Image (cartoon, rainbow, N blue to C red):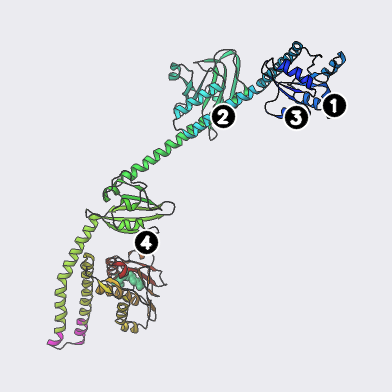
Amino acid sequence: MANQYILLILSDPQATRNLRERVLVPAGFRVNVVKDWKAADEILQAEASPDLVILSEKLESRDRSGHARSLIKRFPFLPVLLLPNKISETGILQAIRDGYFDCLRVPLKPNEVLNTVNRALERRQGWIEYAREVARQSTAPMDQRIDSLEVIERIGRKVASSLDLDNLLTSVVEAAVQLCAAEEGSLLLLDESTGELYVRAERNFQQEMIDTFRLPVSDPLSAQVMRTGEPLLINEKTPRMINTSFSVYSLLCVPLMVHDHAIGILEVDHRQSGNSFESEQVTMLMALAGYAAIAIENTRLYLHSESERLKLESILTGIEEALVVVDHDRRLVLINRKACEAFGIAEQNVIGKRVSEVFPSSELLEILVDPDHTGPSRIEVGLADGRVLNAQITALPEIGLVVTMQDITHLKELDRIKGDFVNTVSHDLRSPLTAILGYLELIGRVGSLNPRQREFIHRIEISVNNITALINDLLDLGRIETGFDVRKEIVPLAVLIQYTVDGMKNRITEKNQSLQMVIGDDLPPVLGNPVRLRQMLSNLISNSLKYTPIGGTITVSAHAEAGQIILQFSDNGLGIPPADLPYVFDKFYRASNVPIDAPGTGLGLAIVKSIVENHRGRVWVDSAPGNGTRFTIVLPTAERDL
Ligand code: ADP
């Protein structure tokens, strides 16, 4: 009891000295003395409160506000001894009734005082131990519940963070056995092909049993759990056969539910008698079964999506087309083997890199690095080894750009051979045609012709001129496509437009059409071949005149914008049917609504397209039958091109 802390609330210095110096301090107690209630209150509220209080009757009898009573009430485990003025049986009795532990006898005898003090402290110790025991008993179930919740929470975290299903399900069964204080437990899953339940994870099962155990779903108990989706709790006095392989005294079995459908069961059991399961263990087992079901379903979904991903990946890798996908930041999302081969890119570690770091410079790279690419959806890409790819570019808002590319080298080669052939034939045809025209002219000079003969000769002349125009177009196209027009100079487009229009004045007047020109001030020049550019303008304007009826209006406009010149040729003529629109730039293509007698070879727009592309520009058409037609050409200005 020594070294315990005693508070003396005494106003009498004599009594204080007697108690403290002669009895308590020599006996090893720590003693604090206060003379009034205010100081006593401060000490009692401090953290290190005393183990015993001795209060003089003098102070108590002056205690109008009931401090002594309140002290006894507030600290029920704190024994308070009364130091009376004088001892009397009735006084002692009254003090004990008032809640004092005892009274000290006066005059004070050290042994007696120590006896009483020690008794009081022993009693206090007894009270404290009793209170602790009561508290322990009342919090034990709560502690157990907290432990259980911790185990369940740990399993929940594991489900969320691990993909190792074997390990996870074993942890679930172990937790089930631990929380239900069971002898053994197992997690059985339904084998859809045989309709049997097999052991997927277990705790304390014999190895032989794990290997051979198959429980038909027709087994009444498991069938009931699987069918109803409800838990089953059996606490039997006598062993009950669960199936032919084992018998138990008590069993707790809950279903593993996925989307209202049981995929297996989680069970714990006791093989020894005298143990049973509680209903609250059902709730815990249900929670664990819920986690197991989530883990199994997550794994199934993961494996499914992984196998779909692998399937897709092997399709993308295996296809003959080259494929490139980039995101909105122009970083590589996907590139297949074919594309890597084509551009000489090492397949490793390129995903996520910027296209400019990965791709060698090419026509394709120009489009891929353009953050707001809206241009053509098809381009031809020349490779270093001479091959040509046809690239389709598709913008997908939620991804970025998808580019698929086919090798069209053989088609380009065929096209070249065809072009060569046409060129040679056209060339060889031109001389005899010139001779025919020459002789036609001579016929009239060598003798007189009757009107019918003149008429026939005129028709022959028209036909030969048509064939010559066709041959000239073919030869031009051949030259442009083979890239012979390499010489380029600064061309003032505004002047060229004016010349071209001036050259067509007669045709405009003949058809009573009006031609308006809207040319921006200070239209910058382009770098190009003036002959070809004039041919381009001429083909487009003459088409507008040709396919616009008498009295129609044609507008030619040109303006500069961000280093580009935008040219537009609009008319209010017959328009082009939607079905023909994609093909009007093809060689020899004429739309279905062209009047039979409209002269033309179907090569004019093919020539325009070749010229525009040779000048690194783009051309497209907007049209609707009856609403007229508008051709747009975009060319880089000379400044940007240099
Ligand atoms: P063509 O010698 O037949 O004019 P082009 O190659 O110049 O051949 O034009 C191809 C076809 O495009 C034309 O046959 C016609 O159907 C259509 N086309 C071209 N320009 C116009 C236009 N301004 N208005 C309507 N159709 C046009």
Q: Is residue 380 above or below residue 26?
A: below
Task: Evaluate if marks 2 and 1 touch, with contact meaning CB atoms under 8 Å apart.
Answer: no
Nearer the N terminus, badge 4 or badge 1?
1
Nearer the N terminus, badge 2 or badge 3?
3
Q: Residues within 10 Å of mark 1 (few under 14, many from 20)?
A: few
Q: Quadrant of ligand 1?
A: bottom left
From where the camera sits, is residue 262 visible? no
Q: Residues within 10 Å of mark 2 (few under 14, many from 20)?
A: many
* Disc 1 CB within 8 Å of nearest ligand 1 atom: no
**Secondary structure state at the residue bearing disc 2:** helix
Identify the residue position indicated by label 2 in the image: 287
Q: Residue furthest bottom?
A: 448
Q: Which kind of residue does numbered mark 4 sit on?
A: Gly
Nearer the N terminus, badge 3 or badge 4?
3
Identify the residue position indicated by label 3 in the image: 39
Identify the residue position indicated by label 1 in the image: 62
Q: Main secondary structure of the magenta part?
A: helix
- The magenta span reads 443-457
Q: Position of residue 316 (x, y in %)?
A: 34, 45
Left or right of residue 407, residue 177 in this image: right
